[in-house]
Amino acid sequence: MKIAVIAHLKYPIGQPYAGGLEMHTHLMTRELRRRGHAVTLFASAGSDPALEPVCVCPPTGEDLGDPLRWAAIERAEREAYRRIMDAVHAGGFDLVHNNSLHALPLAESGETDIPWVTVLHTPPFESLVSGIRAARADMRYLAVSRTLATEWTDLIPDLDVVSNGIDLATFPYSAEADPEAHAFWFGRIVPEKGLHLAIDAARAAGFPLVFAGPKLNPAYWEAEIAPRLGPDLTHLGHLSHRDLAHHLGRARVAVVTPRWEEPFGLVVTEALACGTPVAAFHRGAMPEILDASCGRLARGDDAADLARAIRGAAALDRRDCRARVEAQFDAEVMTARYEAVYDQMIAGMHLHRPLLSAAE
């Protein structure tokens, strides 16, 4: 198939990834190409050149901390998505895979007569809901978890689920952790990811904490992280996936601290792939990914209960962690499920397209 993939434009689709959506879009594009599809990725500047992206604008998330820039950023983003839609209309594509989370592609989706698939990666928010209300009636929507699907039930009652997957080769299994036991946390260092609670919990559990990720919110760092820094904490900075996997495989336990209803949680699957069990807050899709063989859950925002979960998870069998991901969250399985949806959509278009007369 000739597929247009519309990314969100906040951050580049390339390493080091700003977050899970960037990693997911990169991996999905790569996998679709590996399986023989001609994929055009529309994304922001700085995206991985190996994907041959059509870069339509500078990343629009870099100045989000400046309220004075919001109106200009929003205007630039809308103009960029309009350019993408012009390219989609003219591109001769067989299908559009929409990962953008922006209203404009949805609202203008009816201007094309090819199938559209939109994957929902977040709970409902006002602008996305408005785009969905304006979208073509035959849009196919998918959610990345059952938990997320329930949050969209009022607007989209019959929402299918395709779980996110990861590249198992990128996150190789490590049979043994470092002799000097420590915990590991990684992600965007922003309030909703809860690093400060991971620090408190690891200390209460008696584990030094190594953490990695971009400092995207300077105010949060100064208010919550800097005062907690000490000899039992090590910040590795923003890592490539290769380096991240190396450090994950050395940890005795990974700590995941979402402060909202996390729609999926790629960090959990990445840790498990390396054989590292996970202690996490009981939020969003965490219970879908973790079972008793590979993780322990704690009450949300409760650092003391998370310390208990850290101690419990650290004792779990690393082989069971890897087996969980191989069975449920392999990128090849995810991509095959997307292909099945594409086939259904295209078959449906052919089924409902008027037959040509003999004269035609």
Image (spheres, rainbow, N blue to C red):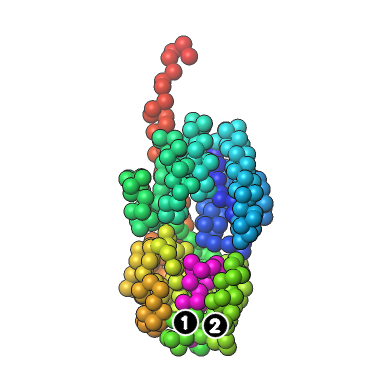
Q: Of marks 1 and 2, which one's residue comes earlier in the chain?
A: 1
Q: Is residue 258 above or below residue 199?
A: above
Instruction: Based on the picture, tell me whether residue 184 belongs to the magenta stretch.
Output: yes
Q: Is residue 306 above or below residue 103?
A: below
Res 220 seen here: yes
Q: Is residue 104 left or right of residue 205?
A: right
Residue at image position (54%, 68%) is: 190
Res 36 seen here: no
Which residue is under mark 1?
200
Residues drawn in magenta: 181-197
Q: CA distance from mark 1 to mark 2?
A: 8 Å
- All told, the count of numbered labels is 2
> Callout 2: 10 Å neighbours few (<14), some, many (20+)?
some
* Residue 204 in picture, x, y percent from top left: 43, 86
Find out whether the residues at labels 1 and 2 contact each other: C-beta distance under 8 Å: yes
Instruction: Choose between 175 and 6: the one closer to the eye.
Output: 6
- Mark 1 is on which residue type? Asp
- Mark 2 is on which residue type? Arg
**Is disc 1 placed on a helix, strand or loop?**
helix
Which residue is under mark 2?
228
Q: Is residue 36 above or below residue 90?
A: below
> Which residue appears farthest toward the front when viewing the image?
68
* Residue 191 in picture, x, y percent from top left: 51, 69
* Residue 40 in picture, x, y percent from top left: 59, 44
